[in-house]
Amino acid sequence: MTVLPKFEVLEDRIVLAGADPDVTFTTTNPDEVIELGEQDVAFTLTFDNTGTDSGYVPFAEIIIPTSGADGEGDGPTFDSAPFLGSPITTTEVVFDVNGEAEHPFLLDPDGDPLVISGTEGDTLVVLELPYGSFSPGNPAVDIDVVIDFSPEADLNANPTFGVVGGFALGCDELDNAYDEFGDPIDPPIREVMASTSVDPQLFQVTKANTAPESEASTGPNYVYQYVLTIDVAPGQTLTDFTLTDTLPPELVYVGNPVVISGPGVVDTISEPPVGQVTAPNNQLVVEFEEGSETVTVTFDYYIRNSPSTGGTTNSATTGADEDVINSVTGEGLWTPIDTDDAPVLVNDSATDTVTASTLSVQKSNERITDNQATNQATPEDIYEFT
């Protein structure tokens, strides 16, 4: 490990001229659903110099809300920060009872460790980038950061991470922060803190249809299927859970409900009438004694091909397409793993839109001859359009 000299800092500042460190902190996969459970989540810390001069000895800081929403220490924790397959030097400091953490190498004007303010029990992580300097125009650097989330985390806590970038030696390679009178010459640069919040989910209800391109031809000759999914966070369990799908008047329930409940236990299934307009008895209700991990419910339906006062399937005069919207809700009792937290009633909902069409046209293609690179589109490959 390289031993850094001690650098003094007057105050946090944004550099208007010279080197300007810029740091962002985001989830590596923006579409990833962070679940309320024991999970490793990949973040990307991006470091850049948006100033006009080079900065020397770049570093970044992450403040992790380890204390949790209720201060019981059930918040996320730091796991690792690999860069190009190798770990970089990191230092973790826990904020003390006064909400203070001493920086591992920056000093204040009195020569004492720079004190960072935060929340008792949270964690300051300082990352030393493997560069002596970083110049404007250099490509921004992405560092993988893995954060561990606790299975005892609180619901709707929305942990917020603070991030800071800086240059320990300022804008030149010399340790010349101040002159003999204590006046600044080239003090370290430490940008103003930015923040990133995430929203871990206890469970999600989703709904999808099997109509190609979500375009359903109308009438009883065209039967499709709805797929309802309950995805519960790892290690969590919901009890007395009710899944309710409310069918719109354009939809005719065909039946064939299939429940793949995984570790869950199904109690009862209540169906709408089969083969007729469902309203007002238009709800498919599946009740579970308990459910965990992934639960899937499917059923068959078609869309009526005649207009109705309850919702026009297609225009009576033009046959124009119309959207049919279907909604599903799920509600159950969650008993937290953390025994200090009380059970709570939780719910979620989802909608799906399928287009009712008197004339459905879809186009697809398939590679039938792969002449060069396997499973890649290359010259001389032959495709078939359908």
Image (spheres, rainbow, N blue to C red):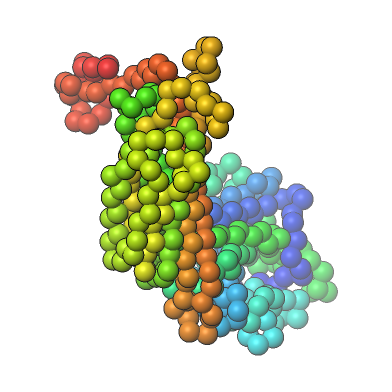
Q: In which quarter of the image is residue 118?
A: bottom right
Q: Where is residue 69 in the image (x, y as percent from the top left)?
A: 60, 74
Q: In which quarter of the image is the N terminus?
A: bottom left
Residue 140 visible in the current orientation: yes
Please name whichever residue, 160 or 374, is drawn nearer the observer in this view of the structure.
Answer: 160
The relative height of residue 380 versus residue 78 in the rendered view (above or below) is above
Please name whichever residue, 301 or 238, is drawn nearer the observer in this view of the structure.
Answer: 301
In the image, 3: left or right of 252? Answer: right
Q: Quadrant of the C terminus?
A: top left
What residue is shown at x 35% (from left), y 36% (from top)? 275
What residue is shown at x 41% (from left), y 30% (from top)? 303
Q: Position of residue 112 (x, y in %)?
A: 69, 82
Please name whichever residue, 24 or 127, is drawn nearer the observer in this view of the structure.
Answer: 24
The relative height of residue 349 versus residue 164 in the rendered view (above or below) is above
The relative height of residue 84 versus residue 306 in the rendered view (above or below) is below
What residue is shown at x 57% (from left), y 76% (from top)? 68
In the image, 21: left or right of 43? Answer: right
The relative height of residue 5 versus residue 340 in the rendered view (above or below) is above
In the image, 224: left or right of 332? Answer: left
Q: Where is residue 108 in the image (x, y as percent from the top left)?
A: 72, 76
What residue is shown at x 19% (from left), y 30% (from top)? 374
Most distant residue in the bottom direction: 97
Residue 84 visible in the current orientation: no
